[in-house]
């Protein structure tokens, strides 16, 4: 069984902080907002219903991004909110993973 490194963001205060005072890093596929974390890092993933109509596709993208994060060795200890852009291609798994890793390196 996989060891879960991060918990998800559920506190509305943290989400408000992220959207008001967070730093932003983005590329063609992702927009990442992050703030420093005092104790443990938390992650939120957003896949817009406007961009991906079918729930099956949105859930697949969330699972892919979670697997990228949980299998990575160099995740910063920050509260991170990942927004998936409409250019995301779930069939091109390797390129999506590389792009996410590049953004996470910029956060450090």
Image (tube, rainbow, N blue to C red):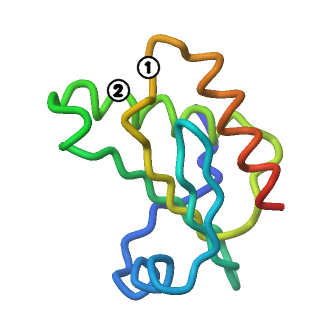
* Residue at x 34% of width, y 82% of height: 12
Q: Which residue is mark 1?
A: 90
Residue mark closest to the camera, 2 vs 1: 1
Residue 70 badge: none
- The x, y position of residue 95, in whole percent, is 64, 20
Q: Kindly state the secondary structure of the residue where label 1 is placed.
A: loop
The quadrant of the rendering that contains the N terminus is top right
- The x, y position of residue 73, in whole percent, is 81, 41
* Nearest the eye: 49 or 39: 49
Q: Kindly state the secondary structure of the residue where label 2 is placed.
A: helix
Q: Residues within 10 Å of mark 1 (few under 14, many from 20)?
A: some
* Nearest the eye: 88 or 66: 88
Q: Is residue 59 left or right of residue 102?
A: left
Q: Is residue 60 left or right of residue 71?
A: left
Q: Is residue 107 above or below residue 95?
A: below
Q: Residues within 10 Å of mark 2 (few under 14, many from 20)?
A: few
* Residue at x 37% of width, y 35% of height: 86
| Number of numbered callouts drawn | 2
Q: Is residue 38 above or below residue 45?
A: below
Residue 87, quarter of the rendered image:
top left
Q: CA distance from mark 2 to mark 1?
A: 8 Å
* Nearest the eye: 51 or 15: 51
* Residue at x 47% of width, y 85% of height: 20
Q: Is residue 72 left or right of residue 19?
A: right
- The x, y position of residue 37, in whole percent, is 67, 79
Residue 60 badge: 2
The answer to the question of whether label 2 and label 1 lie on touching residues, with beta carbons closer than 8 A, is yes
Q: Earlier in the sequence, mark 2 or mark 1?
A: 2
* Residue at x 43% of width, y 19% of height: 90
The quadrant of the rendering that contains the C terminus is bottom right
């Amino acid at each position: 069984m996989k060891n879960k490194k991060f918990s998800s963001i559920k506190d509305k205060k943290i989400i408000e902080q992220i959207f008001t005072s967070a730093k932003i890093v983005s590329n063609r596929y992702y927009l990442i907002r992050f703030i420093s974390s005092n104790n443990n890092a938390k992650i939120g993933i957003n896949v817009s219903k406007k961009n991906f109509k079918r729930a099956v596709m949105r859930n697949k993208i969330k699972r892919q991004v979670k697997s990228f994060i949980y299998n990575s060795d160099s995740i910063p200890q920050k509260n991170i909110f990942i927004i998936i852009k409409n250019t995301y291609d779930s069939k091109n798994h390797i390129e999506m993973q590389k792009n996410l890793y590049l953004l996470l390196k910029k956060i450090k």
